[in-house]
Image (cartoon, rainbow, N blue to C red):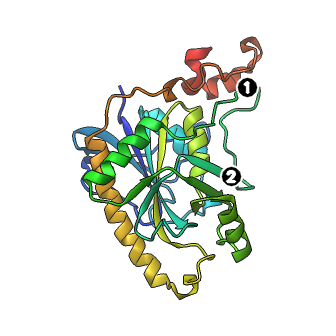
Amino acid sequence: MAQAEIGIIGGSGLYNMPGITDIHEVPQETPFGAPSDAYVLGTLEGKKVAFLARHGRGHRLLPSELNFRANIYGFKQLGVDRILSVSAVGSLKEEHKPLEFVIPDQFVDRTRHRVDTFFGNGVVAHVAFADPVCPQLSETLAAACKKANVVGKRGGTYICMEGPAFSTKAESKVYRQWGMDVIGMTNLQEAKLAREAELCYTTIAMVTDYDCWHPDHDAVTVNDIIANLTQNAANAAKLVTEAVRSMPERECKCGAALAHALITDRTTIPAATRKKLELLVGKYL
């Protein structure tokens, strides 16, 4: 029996989820190592949820240090089939103002040092990723923004950079020329792995400030950023609560993402790899 149905990933500023009752913590061990922290399980708006602090409580992990595979696999082990991912971002367009949210529908990868697939070691799979987020989940979030009285814009592209340093002005200007909307350091890998795990996934991108392209960027202080993070976290909690409350029955195609993705001859899959990936591909073997 599933211990949770909806997963919530908290990013910078959102290290716990207000409103969850019947709380208990569940550490997870996965074939890919340990997740960022213990999962906090409980009930939110009558639904069973699992919350994970992406960077660990106390914000201990760099974006490049995150064990993305373990984080997503841990949700899968708990029975989650949908993930709402909250993430702090910088804005690359004047129209995306600090304290506003963007629900991106596309990603561009500018990372260099990260593992972003469960496959390999004798199994090859190529999932479709043209539309990298769940449209039903994005629609639910967009509707929840209105109900929660939060400014949230659906659509746009999230460019995922390596970090931990922020962009140079030259890079920031290039990303703007490419038409990118927001920039962050974490969500691309989560989206890819969620697709491979056949989980619905979408991002709530919380704008903290304009990236360094903006002429007023140098006037922004650390205190300003922290104040925006705090306010964004409060709004994100309201938004997630509303989205969980109004979550419809699952009608998307995310739950069958691997149906035609596995290329490898089943008879050649090594026993150890088959065992490691049983939770993900067992129904197709």
77 sits to left or right of 178 = left
Q: Is residue 89 above or below residue 193?
A: below
**Label 2 environment density (alpha carbons within 10 Å; few <14, some 14–19, many ≥20):** some
Pinpoint residue 125: horizontal percent, then vertical percent: 70, 27
SS label for mark 1 = loop
Q: Is residue 25 visible?
A: no
- Residue at 70%, 75% in the rendered image: 168
Pinpoint residue 19: horizontal percent, then vertical percent: 24, 53
- Residue at 40%, 62% in the rendered image: 14
Judging depth in this view, the residue of 223 and 58 nearest the camera is: 223
Quadrant showing the N terminus: top left
Q: Is residue 66 visible?
A: yes
Pinpoint residue 114: horizontal percent, then vertical percent: 70, 51
Quadrant showing the C terminus: top right
The CA distance from mark 1 to mark 2 is: 23 Å
**Label 1 environment density (alpha carbons within 10 Å; few <14, some 14–19, many ≥20):** some
270 sits to left or right of 150 = right
Q: Amino acid at mark 1?
A: Val
SS label for mark 2 = strand
98 sits to left or right of 273 = left
Q: Which residue is mark 2?
A: 109
Q: Which residue is mark 1?
A: 123
Q: Amino acid at mark 2?
A: Asp
- Residue at 36%, 60% in the rendered image: 151
Quarter of the figure with residue 149: bottom left
N-term-proximal mark, 1 vs 2: 2
Judging depth in this view, the residue of 217 and 259 nearest the camera is: 217
Q: How many marks can you see?
A: 2
- Residue at 29%, 53% in the rendered image: 146
